[in-house]
Amino acid sequence: MIYSVRQTTIKHGDANFHILLYIICITSFLIGYFGKNYLIIFLSSSALHFCIESLLTLTGIRKGRTFLFGKQLPRVGEISLRSLVEGPAFCVPAYFMADQIKLGNFATIALLGGITVGLASLYSALSDNYFVKKHVNTDKIITSRRAMSKPKAFITLLLINSFFLFLIVRLPNIAFQHATLYLVSYACFVLLFYFINYNLGVRYIETYDSKKDEYTKPSLFYQVFGLFYDSVFEMTLFISPAYLIPYYLGLFN
């Protein structure tokens, strides 16, 4: 069994809350300056992540605990905080990138988008890294694992993502171009997030040996492959309804 692993402490929820405030500030600016599309992508990505995180928790695929200001959050609070951060943190900048690249502002906007997502990713990773090292060899380290290779889940995800890919291909030409730019930007931002977190030792891939009843870290090749698969296949396509549903409902300008 292969797992996507994150190591945190009870301080991770605090860092997530700070990032949420950062996201709200950026999204508010984009709404005020560019219009309601950014409110829609913020809300749709949050709602989609809430549904996904609820499903992962109920099925036992997602295991872990979340604390905020030293107190453990109930499941609803944990899912809500994660959804409000992990959804808009990538979807809003990706939509902005797609908009600006269509206008021909590639170099400047790519740098700006990378800095925006990179700062949030770096803050989260540095915070986790600092507190994990501070509490090493104690029971205060929280290891959250998400199964990536359960056969039924993998096949279900493959079918769902194939359907989403079909919906993307069926988009009219102009919308297809924008959606493709959005998805590529999203994938790049998630890869950047994983790259920063992996190099700071708080996000990585593990395999489970049932005979030895232990988790082990595979080689660098499998780390790169696993994180790339996680970001492009599991994340980018699976989160695409945050864009597709508002589009097909006619909510975007």
Image: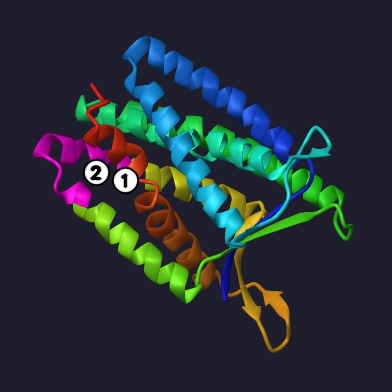
Q: Quadrant of residue 94?
A: top left
In percent of width and height, residue 232 lies at 39, 55
**Residue pictured at 80% horizontal, 32% vertical:** 69
Q: Nearer the viewer, residue 118 or 160?
A: 160
Q: Quadrant of residue 83?
A: top right
**Element on which disc 1 rests:** helix
In percent of width and height, residue 118 lies at 52, 37
What residue does disc 1 label? 184
Q: Are marks 1 and 2 in contact (CB under 8 Å)?
A: yes
What number of labels is visible?
2
In percent of width and height, residue 193 lies at 52, 46
**Element on which disc 2 rests:** helix
What residue does disc 2 label? 180
**Residue 107 placement, left or right of 20:** left
> Considering only vertical position in the picture, is 165 above or below 102?
below
**Placement of the N terminus among the 4 image quadrants:** bottom right
**Residue pictured at 60% horizontal, 54% vertical:** 57
| Mark 2 burial class by Cα count in 10 Å: few <14, some 14-19, many 20+ | some
**Residue pictured at 24% horizontal, 54% vertical:** 165
Query: Is 169 colored magenta in this rendering?
Result: yes
**Residue pictured at 38% horizontal, 43% vertical:** 186
| Mark 1 burial class by Cα count in 10 Å: few <14, some 14-19, many 20+ | some
Three-letter residue code for mark 2:
Thr
Query: Is 88 colored magenta in this rendering?
Result: no
Magenta stretch: give its range: 167-184
Three-letter residue code for mark 1:
Val
Residue at the far left: name it: 173
What secondary structure is the stretch in magenta mostly built from? helix
